[in-house]
Image (cartoon, helix red, strand yellow):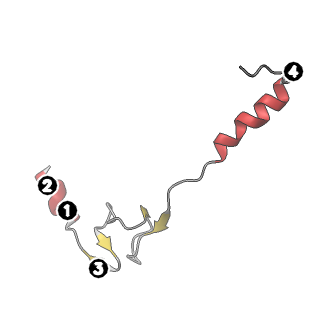
Amino acid sequence: MAVPKKKVSKARRDKRRSQNSKLTLPGVAKCSNPACDAFVKNHCVCKVCGFYNGKKVLDVKADKKKA
């Protein structure tokens, strides 16, 4: 079994552990509807206005009434 030769300082240990906080967010883009400024995950329909790729795909107001 490997045994460390010297104690790892708190600063060195924390520098190594802090690298996990630099992970990136999933791809996010602006909605394709010019009137909507919401951010949407890539390749997903906008939940605010129902647009995808510049076309109306969902009727958002009708979906809210059903729920």
Residue with the mark numbered 1: 61
Camera-nearest label, 4 or 2: 4
Q: Is there CB contact under 8 Å for labels 3 and 2?
A: no
Q: Secondary structure at mark 2?
A: helix
Q: Which residue lies under the disc numbered 2?
A: 65
How many numbered marks, from 0 up?
4
Mark 3 or 1: in front is 3
The mark nearer the N terminus, 3 or 2, is: 3
Q: Nearer the viewer, residue 4 or 21?
A: 4
User: In the structure shown, which secondary structural element does the residue marked by tag 1 occupy?
Assistant: helix
Instruction: Choose top left, top right, bottom left or bottom right for residue 18.
Output: top right
Task: Identify the element where label 3 is drawn.
Answer: strand
Q: CA distance from mark 4 to mark 2?
A: 66 Å
Q: Quadrant of the N terminus?
A: top right
Q: Amino acid at mark 2?
A: Lys
Horizontal and vertical percent position of residue 47 = 31, 60
Instruction: Tell me whether circle 2 and circle 1 mark residues in contact (CB < 8 Å).
Output: yes
Tell me whether circle 3 and circle 1 mark residues in contact (CB < 8 Å).
Answer: no
Q: Earlier in the sequence, mark 1 or mark 4?
A: 4
For label 3, the crowd category at 10 Å Cα-Cα, with few meaning under 14, some 14 to 19 and many 20 or more, is few
Q: Residue furthest left?
A: 66
Callout 2: few (<14), some (14-19), or many (20+) C-alpha neighbours within 10 Å?
few
**Looking at the rendered structure, which numbered label has been put on residue 5?**
4
Going by the image, does 38 lie left or right of 58? right
The kind of residue on which mark 3 rests is Lys
- Relative placement, left or right, of 43 versus 17 is left
CA gap, disc 3 and disc 2:
22 Å
- Give residue 51's quadrant in the image: bottom left
**Which residue was labeled with disc 3?**
55
Q: Residue at x 31, y 67 (%)?
A: 49
- In this picture, residue 39 sits left or right of residue 17: left
